[in-house]
Image: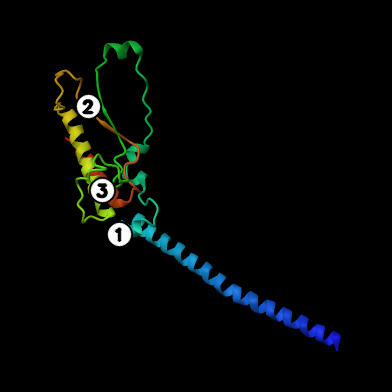
Amino acid sequence: DRMAHHKYNSICSITRRRQCWKITLIPLCTALNLCLIFIIFISIVSLLELQFGIDLSSQLQSLTPACTDTKKICPAGYTAIDRPSSERADALENFEPFSYLIASDSQIDWYDGESAYIGTMNYPPPCTKRDSCGSCTKKMGTYTNTQMKKAMEALIQNESGSEDKDIGPVPKTIVMNGDLTQYFHRDEFFKYKSFYHNIE
């Protein structure tokens, strides 16, 4: 009887373990399937933006990586410069002074709350109390880059307001350094281009 009872308990224990494993396996498989569905969804959304040029909503953009191929947009930036250097004597004889502008972090559209009005206003001047964080960020991106573009054009047109009439040669080009946009999505790139590809 004892042996029969022990055998019965062993069979019950094995049966319970199998049932517990099945109960655990079902939610585990469900969670894995949901993860796979999410990964597939993000991949499809990224391909829609990258391959088919579809501009995504800001909510979807926050889920996807930077989806613009810089090699396609600016192939000149990937062209190797292979030019011989001038001889020192020729360079000194034919030297012409030049200047160029260097700007940093246009970062369209990004804003972390920094403002000259902190402590006196609850929001920076381009925004209103009705703005959400997202809409204020876009307004700040437009405002700060408009100001930077105006400053560049004033230097190019020699309208900087300096009393020194001979402030040097007019800048011939602009070097943009740092983060050009927030995530380099299509709409961010086009906004950047609208600012800095038509400076006069």
- Of all residues, the one furthest to the bottom in this rendering is 1
Question: Number of numbered discs present?
Answer: 3
Q: Which residue is mark 2?
A: 171
User: Quick check: 142 above or below 131?
Assistant: above
Q: Is residue 175 left or right of residue 165?
A: right
Q: Is residue 71 left or right of residue 134?
A: right
Sequence-wise, which precedes: disc 2 or disc 3? Answer: 2
Foreground label between 1 and 3: 1
Measured as percent of width and height from the top left, residue 114 is found at 30, 42
Measured as percent of width and height from the top left, residue 43 is found at 42, 60
- Please give the label number shown on residue 57: 1
Q: Element type at marker 1?
A: loop
Q: Element type at marker 2?
A: loop
Return the residue nearer the eye: 197 or 21: 21
Sequence-wise, which precedes: disc 1 or disc 3? Answer: 1
- State the separation of the CA atoms marked 2 and 1: 38 Å
User: Quick check: 107 above or below 161?
Assistant: below
Residue plotted at (70% across, 81% down): 15
Return the residue nearer the eye: 12 or 116: 116
Residue 92: quarter of image: top left
Q: Which residue is mark 3?
A: 190
- State the separation of the CA atoms marked 1 and 3: 15 Å
- For label 3, the crowd category at 10 Å Cα-Cα, with few meaning under 14, some 14 to 19 and many 20 or more, is some
Q: Amino acid at mark 1?
A: Ser
Quadrant assignment for the N terminus: bottom right
